[in-house]
Image: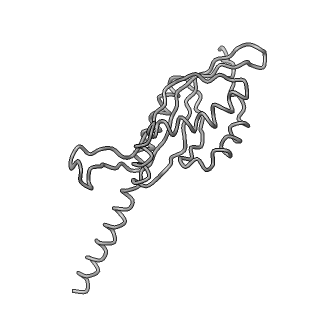
Amino acid sequence: MKRLNYIILFLLIAGVFANVSAQTVYMVCTWDTSSIFKGKDGREKFERRFYVSNTVSISKEDFLKADSEGGRLEGVCAAYLTNTVEKAAIERGENLEGGKLKVIRSIELSGEDVGSRNMYKFATKEDVEKKRDADIKEMQDANRFIMNFDWDITGKNEAADYAVEKKRPLPTPAPVKKP
């Protein structure tokens, strides 16, 4: 009987922890864009870039609140990029062009149980990072410069992240050596 109580207690605790971890939303923001700037030789240079954020995590409730307001999470990431990466690039004399912004997230509607507490399906942090890694590989194969940036979904570190971006040097491609 005592062993059965321990098993039941273990299952209850495991269920609580599984439920808590399943309620965390993991996200990565990516931006495929291009840059035009003056090189050291004074000539105009063109680069294709793929900006990739760190993996951020928030609670399901905070995610749903942020994702339901205005421009959704894509808008939150776009605003962060504008206020950090793009602002610093403009100050360096670069012109970053539109591009394609994407937020990889670990939450989606399950398609079942709509209106119930089980209406969402959650992926793991590892699943999100696998998708990020696949996108990075695809962009590397397309000869993009991979540029990491910090994304603080709360916006509290925006000034610090902007300061880091201001120090970023222009990534000039190395000349191709002919055999």
In the rendered structure, the answer to whether residue 151 lies left or right of residue 19 reads: right
Note whether 45 is above or below 159 in the view shown: above
Quadrant location of the C terminus in the rendered image: top right
Quarter-of-image position of residue 96: top right
Most foreground residue, 165 or 84: 84
Residue sitting at 30 percent across and 49 percent down?
Answer: 120
Q: Position of residue 92 (x, y in %)?
A: 73, 28
Quadrant location of the N terminus in the rendered image: bottom left
Q: Position of residue 95 (x, y in %)?
A: 65, 22
Residue sitting at 37 percent across and 56 percent down?
Answer: 23
Residue sitting at 73 percent across and 18 percent down?
Answer: 38
Badge count: 0
Residue sitting at 78 percent across and 20 percent down?
Answer: 40
Note whether 133 is above or below 45 in the view shown: below
Note whether 32 is above or below 109 in the view shown: above
Note whether 86 is above or below 9 in the view shown: above
Q: Residue furthest right?
A: 41
In the rendered structure, the answer to whether residue 41 lies left or right of residue 125 reads: right
In the rendered structure, the answer to whether residue 158 lies left or right of residue 7 reads: right
